[in-house]
Amino acid sequence: MLQPCEEVIDFTANIAYEDDILYRHFENIIVKNSDLTRKLVSNQANKTTAHFRWYKYKEAFSSDLVLYLLSKYNIDTGLVLDPFAGAGTTMFAASSQGLGSDGIELLPIGQEIIKTKILIYDICMEDEDIINEIKDFINARSWTKNGENINFDILPITAGAYPPETDKKIKRLLNDIALLNSKTKEVLFFCLLCILENISYTRKDGQYLRWDYRSGRRAGQNPFDKGNILDFDSAFTDKCHEVIEDIGCLSKVNTHEIGHINLYKGSCLKILPTIPANTYSALITSPPYCNRYDYTRTYALENAILGVDKKLIIELRQEMLSCTVENKKKNLLNLNKDWQAAIDICDESHLLQSILDYMDYLKANKLLNNNGIATMIRGYFYEMACVIYECYRTLKPQSYMFMVNDNVKYAGVSISVDLILSQIAEQIGFSVEEIMVLPRGKGNSSQQMGSHGRDELRKCVYVWRKA
Ligand SMILES: C[S@@+](CC[C@H](N)C(=O)[O-])C[C@H]1O[C@@H](n2cnc3c(N)ncnc32)[C@H](O)[C@@H]1O
């Protein structure tokens, strides 16, 4: 095994020293919280919850987590924001409690999920009967018969993603739903989106799509078997029935108790500065983690069906908060000159700078397994500082901001994302009330485990309050 050279030892010792100082600064408010199970803080708890179970957005947290935070911190009036809305968990959970909610989401798949869920809520409120139209459509099973097709093969990376019979049925279905009234069409299209992964040869796996050996794609050394690939007819009709069943429950809710929901489409780095100060009573969010996950690749099946082409995907990847090794540096001051204050705070963060110095050293000496890691980590924290600055500005005084995030590890060094972001928040003006830690942390990516052993990384919910 290679022995680390003296310079590496100096860098890592310096990081450990700065980490220890910051840890001691927050020590009294870093609290293990046994209410915060993995299930609650991930999408798992949504799998059995009406309305939240339709689309399994892997990076989501649960609606129960949002309800838990709203109740624990007595948030029962006003408007709630999620600047990284994903599938809209914060928005719909807050709305179910009568609170208004705004969400900002950049990627088309999240926007489509939120848009269709809003449409379904509207349908229930207006008492329109599209349920019978959906039932008639699924009973007719027109997609099993010969007829016109609509093609969706626009992305090379998704070519051959479905068994041939399924591929044919999707194209037939796309054609036939296009002939329906627009609301019915949108709900049926959404049901199709919800099943794409399960009827395909692929599985979402963080940084990319994994391909099952049955796809015929080159399998490499360890062929992947995703298990049961669902049959199109039953997967689609089951999903439609699930949605119909939940629409039925929603229709029984007193619709006056549902808060207004509003989606902004685009990057929160562009949209947040346009929102007036002191707008929100709470902010509940989970940004992308600093973990190289590439949402634009893992949602390729959905992008293809949504008509998002290769060029737009590349643009979206660059617009996302930096969390992949392909992200280039963003010119933050061009977006908003007021962010100089947030940038200065990052420049002065001793822990962050010690990590960035180490990453730059590793990059210069070709010791990183991907050079983009250094740019990603730098971009992640500087961009997050600007987002936190805007969150502070748009929150009402005394209001809470909650953030779900994981610590990460690169080149053998644990990066305390919780400490760095909380220090940035504190310097922006938040009072850091608590860093709630899940009882069990997270191991590391398999790549990291091989060379550096398994460390537990804190998974946390940060509780910050505007002074
Ligand atoms: C961890 S997920 C949030 C999931 C969400 N809490 C839920 O329960 O569905 C992070 C989200 O941030 C979105 N995102 C990334 N960069 C963004 C940006 N610059 N502006 C707005 N959304 C962004 C991603 O597309 C992703 O949906």
Image (cartoon, rainbow, N blue to C red):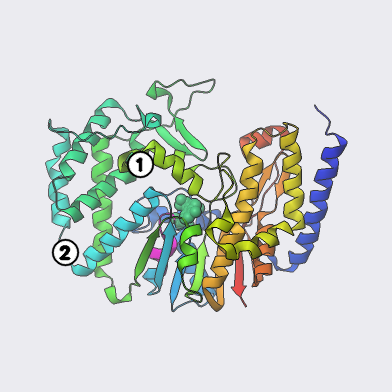
Which residue position holds label 2? 128
Q: Nearer the viewer, residue 301 or 333?
A: 333
| 1 or 2: tag closer to the N-terminus | 2
Percent position (x, y) of residue 380?
A: 60, 51
Disc 2 residue type (three-letter): Glu
Which residues, given as a range, are shown in magenta?
A: 86-94
Residue 440 position in % (x across, y down): 63, 53
Q: Please tell me which residue is depicted at 44% across the width and 54% down the height of the picture.
A: 86
Task: Please identify the quadrant where the N terminus is shown.
Answer: top right
Q: Is residue 325 visible?
A: yes
Question: Does the beta carbon at disc 1 come under 8 Å from ligand 1?
Answer: no
Q: What kind of residue is marked 1?
A: Val
Residue 288 place in picture, x, y as percent = 53, 51
Q: Secondary structure at mark 1?
A: loop
Quarter of the figure that contains the C terminus:
bottom right
Q: Which residue is mark 1?
A: 308
Up-down relation of residue 353 to residue 69 (above or below): above
Residue 34 visible to an observer of this rendering = no
Residue ID at (45%, 78%)? 76
Secondary structure under tag 2 reads loop
Q: Tell me the CA gap for discs 1 and 2.
A: 31 Å
Residue 360 lies left or right of residue 388; in this view the side is right
Q: Is residue 195 left or right of residue 298?
A: left
Above or below, 155 against 217 in this view is: below
